[in-house]
Image: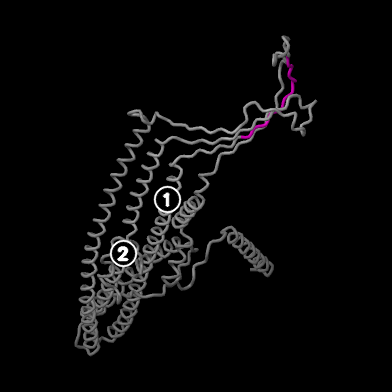
Amino acid sequence: MSRDTKHTLRVSMRRLRVIAAVFAMALSAAAGSAETAPAVLTVEDAVAAALANNVAVKAAVFNERAKKLESDYSFNKLFPSVSVSATALRLNETNPSLVAVAGGSGVYYTPDRNNLALGLTVQEVFNPAVLILMNQTVLEARDGSIGREQAERNMTAAVKKMFYQLYVQDRTIELTRSRLAKAQERLRQAEVSYQLGQIAELNFAYASANVENIIPQLRDMETARAAMIVQFQEILGFDSRPDMALSGSLDTADVSAEKWTGREADRLDVRKAELLVKRTENGLKAQNALLMPNLIVQYKADPALNGPGDNKVTDTSNWRQSSGGLYLTVSWDLSAFIPMSDFQISRAQIKDQLSLARAAETDARRKAVDETANKKRAIEGSLANLGNLERSLASTKRAYELTEISYKAGAGRLTDLQDAEFNSQQAEVTLLAEKLKLMSFVFDWDAAYGAE
């Protein structure tokens, strides 16, 4: 390759690097506000990120905010309605009209073609339903608050479970890598011993097969972990970072089956069922209040100016009103008392909804008690399993140690060592899986009852 050709290639590579850098900067700018995943993540950081970035949680927060705003300003339902108007009128004809009779002769008035009229109407309608609807906004605000709290609790439980699922995956991969490293070292030693004629070919084949079996297992675990970490980072609102590590441990020391006993009334589903009954009762009260008459206070002003071109607009004596004044009206819609009217049908529907809401409340309380008893039994069983699995792990580790000592002394078989090593790893993975199951019970209950 000539010197000119090499120089041209170097220049071209530099240009490509510059273009690639500019393109990367453009992509970074287009990415907007996406947050970069940290190198090390704790479960507390994961929960905080999910609560700050997850769309479902944000929607619940916005819904609560909107309902609270409506509740805080529910007094505006007492505000009167106010309307103003201005009309410019040009008549097609100006026919005179008799406006007065004096001394036996008629007096006629001929209007001007051009006219100007203003209008102001202030009206207040008083009905007990208004006060009931104001109370309804307070109940709706409570419902929004429960919805937001439930969304945050559910997200917290989901993030914690996924975090520790990844933690168990990482620990399993770590154990498998350690087993692979030991298997590869034994294969190297077996190869040397086989070449020296110190062991039979069968032992070398066993060592080689063990390595080849572990490698695809490890690869599958790493592939599953990579996919799950991407999904986890999406939930947290992070850019993808496959090398992100998790910091934490599965601590089950403080778990107790009695933690939630007697707290059924604290469950959000029970509180939401209670609130639904109150909201439906309030809706029925509002419907019944519509049977009451309305007191309407109205002030109306309709000054008009005839011939604004000739009369001064600023002179109040040139303005006249035809129907302006203060009105006090009692209005009573009696159609609601007619059987099978829309009002009566709507009222019957609300009564049915109230019966259903009360049944749902009773059912929610019963389910809460039953679920508490079931989860209590599940936690007690899981705690008992942990004791058995911890003792099993200690036994399998001791068996592995003794088998390894026997193998190194030349008295044990390679297959026995491989089986003991695999059993030791599986015992530890099984223990981690049981801890994850136990903590999943805790996370689900925290979502229902609230963490202490």
Residue behind mark 2: 445
Check disc 1: other Cα within 10 Å, few if <14, some if 14-19, many if 20+: some
Overall secondary structure of the magenta stretch?
A: strand
Q: Quadrant of residue 313?
A: top right
Q: Earlier in the sequence, mark 2 or mark 1?
A: 1
Give above or below for 318 relative to 48: above
Q: Amino acid at mark 2?
A: Trp
The picture places residue 74, in percent across and down from the top left corner, at 49, 49
Q: Nearer the viewer, residue 42 or 15?
A: 42
Farthest front residue in view: 103
What stretch of residues is rendered in magenta? 108-120
Q: Residue at 24% of width from left, 60% of height from top?
A: 369
Which element type, helix, strand or loop, lies under badge 2?
Answer: helix
Residue found farthest to the right: 310
Give the percent coordinates (x, y) of residue 195: 29, 84
Against 252, is 48 above or below? Answer: above
Residue 119 magenta-highlighted: yes
Instruction: Compare residues 80 and 58 and report the one nearer the observer.
Output: 80
Residue designated by label 1: 140
